[in-house]
């Protein structure tokens, strides 16, 4: 006997036909659970953001306007973010150049210093008038650089480079280069005087002084020993200050003395 209190719905099993089939009704279509497509909302949101970014006042639109107006505005008028980007790019480029140039400069300096020992110091390698000055300097460097950590040829090469720097920098009117040129010339003359042969020491020193003085015409060009006087003439010139003068209005005739006298003043009367 069936329990009428049992209200559990009769759900057809896998092999049980739907109740509507036996009564001549069409069978219900099976329910298909569609999985939500998450890609489509994301794509739509991305397209919406892209459209808003390129509208007036959008992020990309404003950045593009900054780039388009940058050539006309110049460095001082362009946007700050563009200045920062250009500055960062410039610094990165300089760092890359320095990174690449460091190896090249190190190799060049190494080749220069290793080629310096090929210079024969203290031997008769120079001829002519230049040998009167050059040979005593070579001899002095060779005699006083034996205890140094670098060779005498390297010291001689450095001495030549310093003199060249002082000559070129002094010609360009650099104060530091002119001081270097003066110290270099004094040191060169002292080395010639110390290492020149005793019989020709005076002549060699005199030629060194003359050569350095002649070269100083280029290194110290424009330099004068005359004191400079600066006279400041202050002339204000004529100053024109327009003024408008309005004539005073004509006053009425002065009244009689009797009219001006106050009413409470009366002359003395004799009785």
Image: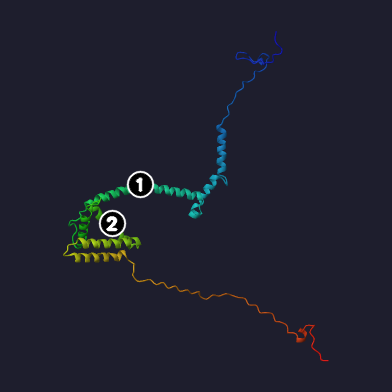
Task: From the image, tell me which residue sits under label 1.
Answer: 100
| Residue at image location 27% in from the left, 63% down from the top | 186
Q: Is residue 97 left or right of residue 83?
A: left
In the orientation shown, which residue stands out farthest toward the front? 271
Most extreme residue toward the top is 1
Residue 263, image x and y in percent? 80, 83
* Quarter of the rendering occupied by the C terminus: bottom right
Point out the residue furthest to the bottom here: 271
Residue holding disc 2 = 161
Nearer to us: label 1 or label 2: 2
Instruction: Bin the neighbour count of mark 1 within 10 Å (Cα to Cα): few under 14, some 14-19, many 20 and up.
Output: few
**Residue 211 falls in which quadrant of the image?**
bottom left
Judging depth in this view, the residue of 227 and 241 nearest the camera is: 227
- The answer to the question of whether label 1 and label 2 lie on touching residues, with beta carbons closer than 8 A, is no
46 up-or-down from 268: above or below: above
Q: Which image quarter holds the N terminus?
A: top right
């Amino acid at each position: 006997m069936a329990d009428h209190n049992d209200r559990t719905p009769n759900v057809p099993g896998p092999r049980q036909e739907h109740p509507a089939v036996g009564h001549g009704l069409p069978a219900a279509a099976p329910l298909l659970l569609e999985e939500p497509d998450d890609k489509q909302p994301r794509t739509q949101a991305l397209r919406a953001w892209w459209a808003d970014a390129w509208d007036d006042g959008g992020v990309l639109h404003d950045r593009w306007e900054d780039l388009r107006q940058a050539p006309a505005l110049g460095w001082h008028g362009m946007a700050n973010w563009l200045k920062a980007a250009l500055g960062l790019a410039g610094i990165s480029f300089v760092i890359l150049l320095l990174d690449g140039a460091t190896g090249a400069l190190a190799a060049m300096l190494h080749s220069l210093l290793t080629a310096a020992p090929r210079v024969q110091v203290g031997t008769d390698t120079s001829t002519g008038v230049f040998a009167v000055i050059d040979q005593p300097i070579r001899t002095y460097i060779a005699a006083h650089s034996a205890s140094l950590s670098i060779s005498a040829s390297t010291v001689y090469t450095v001495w030549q480079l310093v003199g060249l720097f002082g000559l070129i920098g002094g010609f360009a009117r650099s104060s530091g280069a002119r001081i270097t040129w003066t110290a270099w010339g004094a040191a060169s003359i002292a080395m010639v005087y110390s290492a020149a042969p005793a019989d020709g020491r005076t002549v060699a020193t005199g030629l060194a002084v003359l050569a350095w003085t002649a070269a100083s015409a280029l290194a110290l060009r424009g330099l004068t020993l005359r004191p400079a006087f600066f006279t400041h003439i202050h002339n204000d010139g004529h100053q024109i200050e327009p003024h408008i003068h309005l004539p005073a209005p004509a006053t009425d005739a002065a009244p009689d003395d009797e009219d001006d006298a106050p009413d409470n003043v009366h002359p003395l009367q004799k009785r």
